Amino acid sequence: MLLSKEESNQKIFTKLNLKKIIMKNFAITGVAGYIAPRHLQAIKDTGNRLVAAVDPHDSVGILDKYYPDVSFFTEFERFDRHLEKLRREKNQYKVDYVSICSPNNLHDAHIRLALRIGANVICEKPLVLNPWNLDALQELESESSARVFTVLQLRVHPSLLELKQKLNNEKLNRKREVVLSYITSRGLWYYYSWKGLLEKSGGIATNIGVHFFDLLMWLFGNVQSSSLHLKDDKRMAGFLELENANIKWFLSTDRADLPDEVRIKGISTFRSIKVDGEEIQFSEGFTDLHTRVYEETFKGNGFGIEDARPSIKLVHTLRTMPVAKNSDNIHPFTLKYK
């Protein structure tokens, strides 16, 4: 039976795509942590396999839901040795990607391990704590066949992609006025964990704010000036002048900072971006963003070291910047602390 030209083309296309669908082997660090389940889900959703996992804590029963037969280690040295063994044996379990979900201060070392065994990296934000760490990683990446990618999940959020398209289409002869508010309630445990330690997490701006700062620069351009209006263990606030926007921002992990109408409903997180007074709704649609980042990475559209650099540089500046004594352009949530 002769095939039509369209049927023949479709058969060739299907055959080519099947060749491209090759299961990739993953290892993961920090598998007992808060963010790891999103990576486990992304690995599974994209049809790949987890072959090794490590965490000093052994509360990792979640692995049974995804990959019950994965090799698990509580000692990083044994995990390292196992990955090296898989590399040398060059068998079907050789690691292609390492997903990094460990504490922020360990990202740099875990990325180096991945590059050493020739594995690509998908690392949680922030990629590293300091801008100069990026330069060293770029050198290592250039010497390797592998690539370093990070999770900038807001860049794949449908509502924010629509906003970027809208902003690109609307050319203005002035800067937009933007107000960013992000409050994500955390209990006392947070401040006793590594997340509450500046030297391990990088503090509020780095740990919970870095992907929002990345979003703002992705939407409105590079930083022209910045000032800090508030900084304590639970909150930070300030002002950014970007190429195409003036931005008042406020970050907090304190439930007391939630707007009354949000707190009354029992909701623990408040995300808001107002552009020229118009609220941008993006509180929904967060559940599968990691899967979308993985998909885009495999398509060749991943977010690399240079994509991460502007936000890493900014949060480092904010971390080391003194609070301004006289403040203009103050975020309204900041006023009660002045």
Image (cartoon, rainbow, N blue to C red):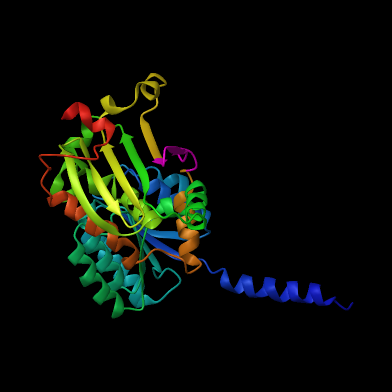
Image position of 290 with respect to 17: above or below: above
Residue drawn at x 68%, y 71% is 14
Quarter location, residue 177: top left
Is residue 240 highlighted in magenta? no
- Among all residues in the image, which is located at the extreme right? 1
Residue 32, visible in the rendered structure = no
- Among all residues in the image, which is located at the extreme top? 264
Q: Position of residue 286 (x, y in %)?
A: 46, 43
- Among all residues in the image, which is located at the extreme bottom? 143
Which region is colored magenta?
A: 274-285
Residue drawn at x 13%, y 50% is 321
Q: Position of residue 165 (x, y in %)?
A: 51, 55
**Pick the front one: 175 or 17:** 175
**Pick the front one: 228 or 48:** 228
**Pick the front one: 178 or 58:** 178
Image position of 231 with respect to 257: above or below: below
Q: Position of residue 194 (x, y in %)?
A: 19, 44
Quarter location, residue 269: top left
Q: Position of residue 155 (x, y in %)?
A: 43, 54
Residue drawn at x 34%, y 48% is 212
Image position of 242 with respect to 236: above or below: below
Q: Is residue 331 left or right of residue 197?
A: right
